[in-house]
Every structure is written in C-alpha cells, then in structure tokens.
Image: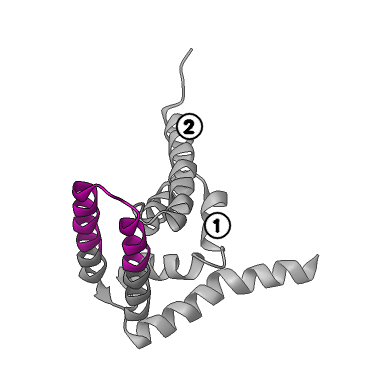
Amino acid sequence: MKINNKFNKKLVFKILGIFFMVVGIIGIFLPVFPTTPFVLLAAYLFFNSSPKLFMILINNRLVGQPLYTFMTYRSISLRSKLIGVLFLWTSGTISMYFIDIFYVKLVMFIVFIAVTFHIFSFRNLTVQENQESRESYNQRFRNKNKCRKKKK
C-alpha cells in the first residue's frame, strides 16, 4: 500500500499548526512563552496545509489584521512594539517577584532582554503602510465576510 506523501505533509502541518496555535494561546497568559512567534508559525503551517484554518486565523478579530500586516510588510508598528514590550516586562517582573531562585530570575531577565531586542529588530511600520495594510485587509477579508453574511 502506497501512502500519499503530499497528504502526509499536509496532515502533519495541520496538526503542528493546531499545536503551535494552542501554545500561542497559552503564551498570552504565561510571560515566558511568547505568543507572536507561535501564531506566526501556525499561520505558516496553515497557509501550507489548510486554507480553511488559515482563513479562520486571518479572519480572527484579534490577530487577523496584525498577522496580515506582518506577512505583507515584515514590519511591526511602533505602538505594537511598545505595548508588547511593556506587557512582557510588566508580567515578567511580576513573575520574577514570586520566584526565589536567583538563577531562574537571571535566565528570565536574559530572555526578556533578548525578546525585547528581537521585537525592536523588526523595522517600524510606517503610517502609510499601516493605512494601506488596513484598507487591503478590509477589502480582501472583512468585506467578503460581511457580504456572505448579508446573503444568508
């Protein structure tokens, strides 16, 4: 019996995409787990395996538009960077307060510094790019869904 390699790859990508999406959701509540890289990885895996799951993700009201903007321009708005870093350091500092082991605190501190540098390593999204991205996103994804809902 011969097994279809393309089918197996899509199935593995789908399963991994779901796994990384769950890890990304967990990362919202745990400061050490970064949410964004896992959601980006899930989007890549869904894009290559399941258009339906990719569309669910890209149409999500919380992550859809920023995800589309990042995929299009490979940049992050300064506002998003500042909010992300502020949330990282606030939740990280609170977490470190409850930990008694110095080396764990040190590792967490180093991770927070590395994540901060990583976030700021992406170029800033310009106001014009942000506006174009919002318009393009709304045209491609939001308006189509509104039309579908009206027809039903």
Q: Nearer the viewer, residue 5 or 87?
A: 87
Q: Mark 2, residues whose alpha carbon is within 10 Å: few (<14), some, or many (≥20)?
A: few
Direction from residue 36 to residue 11 in the image, left or right:
right
Disc sitting over residue 7 in the figure: 2
The range drawn in magenta is: 88-115
Percent across and percent down for residue 147 are: 70, 72
Residue occupying image coordinates x 46% and y 25%: 4
User: The C terminus is located in which quarter?
Assistant: bottom right
Instruction: Decide whether the magenta segment is chiefly helix, strand or loop.
Output: helix
Outermost residue on the top side: it is 1
Q: Mark 1, residues whose alpha carbon is within 10 Å: few (<14), some, or many (≥20)?
A: some
The image quarter in which residue 31 lies: bottom left
Residue occupying image coordinates x 48% and y 79%: 134
Q: Which residue is mark 1?
A: 55
Q: Nearer the viewer, residue 111 or 10?
A: 111
The residue tagged with tag 1: helix, strand or loop?
A: helix
Outermost residue on the right side: it is 152
* 43 shown above or below 11: below
Percent across and percent down for residue 57 are: 53, 57
Percent across and percent down for residue 149 are: 74, 67
Q: Are marks 1 and 2 in contact (CB under 8 Å)?
A: no
Instruction: Tell me the kind of residue under disc 2.
Output: Phe
130 drawn magenta? no
Residue occupying image coordinates x 20% and y 63%: 113
Q: CA gap, disc 1 to disc 2?
A: 20 Å
Instruction: Tell me the kind of residue under disc 1.
Output: Met
Q: Nearer the viewer, residue 116 or 121?
A: 116
Q: Nearer the viewer, residue 46 or 98?
A: 98
The residue tagged with tag 2: helix, strand or loop?
A: helix
Percent across and percent down for residue 81 are: 32, 73
Outermost residue on the front side: it is 100
Disc sitting over residue 137 in the figure: none
